[in-house]
Image (tube, grey):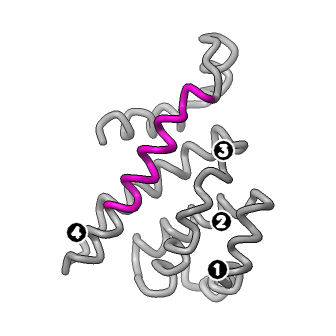
Amino acid sequence: MNALRALHALCRTPGFRELCLDEHKFTTSTFDGYVKEAILLYRSSLDAANAGTSLADWGMYVNICSSIVAFVDVFPERQNEFQTIIPDLIGVIKEKTELARKNSAILLAKLARDEENSKVMRAHHGHEVLLSLQKCL
């Protein structure tokens, strides 16, 4: 998780993409491990939060959502790799409140910029769910 926190901060640095790809000659495949680990952490944090009883149990979930948002802002071509979490995001938005709902909605909106992700959202009524929250967030 500490490595993900560090990458999250780096993704917020202006020009991070150019620094990685142009100056350091990384390829986008360098971050394949992040995508895999982020999805695993997303699922495990969601399971742990659903099993918990307090708002504090949602802390890890909120952090991983924020991390994925920062990552897809820097590497938008990788949005579709997070398609499998879209139904879960929609479920959290419908059922939860506060930061869990807000961060899920932000992540879902970011992922919806990809056409294939948008199709998955439509199939799960995600656009309607986001629109219903327009005044709440």
The residue identified by callout 3 is: 78
Note whether 131 is above or below 3 in the view shown. below
Identity of the residue drawn at 65% across and 59% down = 110
Q: Amino acid at mark 2?
A: Ala
Q: CA distance from mark 2 to mark 4?
A: 24 Å
Residue drawn at (39%, 62%) of the image: 43
Q: Secondary structure at mark 4?
A: helix
The residue that label 4 is drawn on is 56
Tag 3 near tag 4, CB within 8 Å: no
Q: Secondary structure at mark 1?
A: helix
- Secondary element type, mark 2: helix
Query: Of label 3 and label 4, which has the lower sequence position?
Result: 4
Nearest to the observer: residue 80 or residue 5: 80
Mark 4 to mark 1 CA distance (whole Å): 24 Å
The reply to whether dot 1 and dot 2 touch (C-beta < 8 Å) is yes
Magenta stretch: residue 41 in it? yes
Point out residue 15 in the picture as x, y percentages from the top left corner: 64, 26
Circle nearer the viewer, 3 or 4 = 3
- Tell me the residue that label 1 is attached to: 130
As rendered, which of 54 and 77 lies closer to the eye? 77
Tell me the CA gap for discs 3 and 4: 30 Å
Q: Amino acid at mark 1?
A: Leu
Q: Report which residue position mark 2 lands on.
A: 109
- Amino acid marked by disc 3: Arg
Name which of mark 1 and mark 3 comes first in the sequence: 3
Q: Nearer the viewer, mark 2 or mark 3?
A: 3
Q: With 128 as the anchor, is 69 left or right in this view?
A: left
Residue 101 horizontal/vertical position (percent): 46, 75
Is tag 2's residue or tag 4's residue first in the polypeptide sequence? 4
Q: Which residues are magenta?
A: 29-44
